[in-house]
Image (tube, helix red, strand yellow):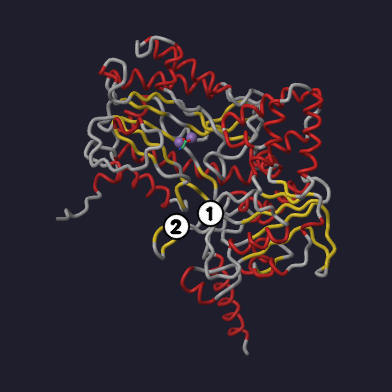
Amino acid sequence: MNYKKIILLVLVALSMQLAKAQDRPTDFLPADFHEGRRQAVREMMPPNSVAVFFANPVRNRANDVDYVYHQDPDFYYLTGYHEPNAVLMIFSEMQNGQEGTYNEILYVQERDPRAEQWNGKRLGVEGAKELLGFSKVYNGSEFATSNIDLKSFDNVLFFDFDNDVRDSRDEADLFDLITSFKAKTNYPSDYDAGKQQLYQMIKSTEVENSANVAQILGRYLNRDESLKEDELLNGFVNASNDETRTDIKEKVSLKLSAHNLNSALLGEIMATLRETKSEEEMVLLKKAIEISAVGQVEVMKAMHPNMSETEIQGVHEYVYKKYGAEYEGYPSIVGGGNNGCILHYIENNKPKVGNDLVLMDLGAEYHGYTADVTRTIPANGKFTKEQKQIYDIVYNAQEAGIMASVVGAPFQAPGQAASKVVTEGLLKLGIIQKEEEARIYFPHGTSHYLGLDVHDKGTYRAFKPNTVITVEPGIYIPEGSDCDKKWWGIAVRIEDDILITEEGPYNLSAMAPRTTEAIETIMAQPSPLDKFNLPELD
Ligand code: GLY
Ligand code: MN
Ligand code: MN
């Protein structure tokens, strides 16, 4: 072979490699991020324990069509694996087995050319090793036959199965994996994760504090009457002295020692880890938020009273897709006028928004991370006097909430600051007469964590640096409300995504204008969509 031929072959091989690399986005979280997160879980696990995570179920939409698959965020965080029917095991210590030493194992969907022709490529064992960086990977069918003895651990940590999971023809689908897990752990048929959590609470209570814990438990029992039928829980709550409570605590410990299952601890571990974001995560989360903010800006330019809620939703989502965002992080909310008063209004089917305010709460999901941004704008480009009066109260409440989002402040701080401004504003306008009536028009919380879930996991303790939260006050005055008619049908929510840093709060969604003046200015600008005319259909 002459050297020209060799160069040609090398070039062909390189371009094939490149084409392969370009088949999928290249900015997913790197394998060492996921590996680091697994190590962080391991460090928080008790000795001689194993944590078992399952992939999300496949969900049927209708007949032979399933919903687009979405991985369980914890599973994604720890593996980067996008496919269903998988199990991850993390061991607190190195294990020595037939297959050598290991401290984690991933079980994945088996490769299957026919299934892949219909439903897309699978990574399989080799792909998971190569792309996700695991050294021990097996096909899901080997989970059932593996001789790892789950009963030999002091604790098997897992999230209980509160999703309904269907058994398909696949012999190693999630249903079968869960069935194997239950068999391997002697999972009691009457296992109740809620009760187990309360038992754990009793078990870890010191005598001095047991009366307080009994009070807290009493609230759980009042919320869920069926818990009162449990002799131990009811006995602990109604005990008249420490002696009785200590007695019950011993019985609870005995009951818990009948198995090694713990479905409470992983919740705490994952909340602690996912509450704060690493630099790599922030790249993706910022991207999701900026994409969503651009969506709001483009809609502000394109909006006119003849638009339907559906079309407005479509413009946001087109911008998301244009930037390569895979999904919406939650069902998009676009509510014109009175529809904005329904907090999670997702029908979005009003044919014309007319001259009302339009409340738009949407977030792009980029490589797993979701934004959550709300803007409320007048469809005709100009706020009326009443709309502006309500809007400005919400704006000032949001400003107060953002200012309160500082390291060390309690999680409730932004909500308290925002509620105060809303209450004062509503009193001043005469919409309410008493402070406690403010809840009628501002009936939701102000903040939640944001990340892989729109309502992300977190501890709800004092704010730590590198936490992302939303600050989203609102005022909603449905038609027929007990106030002057001129306010009816006005609904305003303003929602931004705030990064909490040692230097103070940083608004990640600031690219989307928030003041009435800035919104009106943007709305007066032309939109490229002004010229996007489609043929009339009969
Ligand atoms: N989009 C849901 C929420 O704002 O919490
Ligand atoms: Mn939100
Ligand atoms: Mn929202």
Amino acid at dot 2: Tyr
Q: Nearer the viewer, residue 168 or 118?
A: 168
Mark 1 close to ligand 1, CB under 8 Å: no
Q: Position of residue 416 (x, y in %)?
A: 54, 19
Task: Tell me if 531 is positioned left or right of 108 in this view.
Answer: left
Confirm or deny contact between disc 1 and disc 2 (CB under 8 A).
Answer: no
Q: Is residue 152 above or below residue 330?
A: below
Q: Secondary structure at mark 1?
A: loop
Q: Position of residue 235 (x, y in %)?
A: 71, 30
Q: Position of residue 505 (x, y in %)?
A: 58, 27
Amino acid at dot 1: Asp
Mark earlier in primary sequence (1, 2):
2
Circle on res. 391:
none
Mark 2 close to ligand 1, CB under 8 Å: no
Q: Nearer the viewer, residue 9 or 193?
A: 193
User: Dot 1 surroundings within 10 Å: few (below 14), some, or many (20 or more)?
Assistant: few
Quadrant location, the C terminus: bottom left
Residue matched to label 2 = 67
Q: Nearer the viewer, residue 155 or 255?
A: 255
Residue matched to label 1 = 164
Looking at the image, the residue that sits furthest to the left is: 538
Looking at the image, the residue that sits furthest to the right is: 96
Q: Residue at x 66, y 40 (%)?
A: 195
Q: Residue at x 58, y 24 (%)?
A: 412
Snapshot quadrant of residue 244: top right
User: Dot 2 surroundings within 10 Å: few (below 14), some, or many (20 or more)?
Assistant: few
Q: Residue at x 31, y 38 (%)?
A: 301
Snapshot quadrant of residue 60: bottom left
Q: Residue at x 37, y 38 (%)?
A: 345
Disc 1 or disc 2, which is closer to the eye? 1
Q: Secondary structure at mark 2?
A: loop
State the CA–CA distance, disc 1 to disc 2.
15 Å
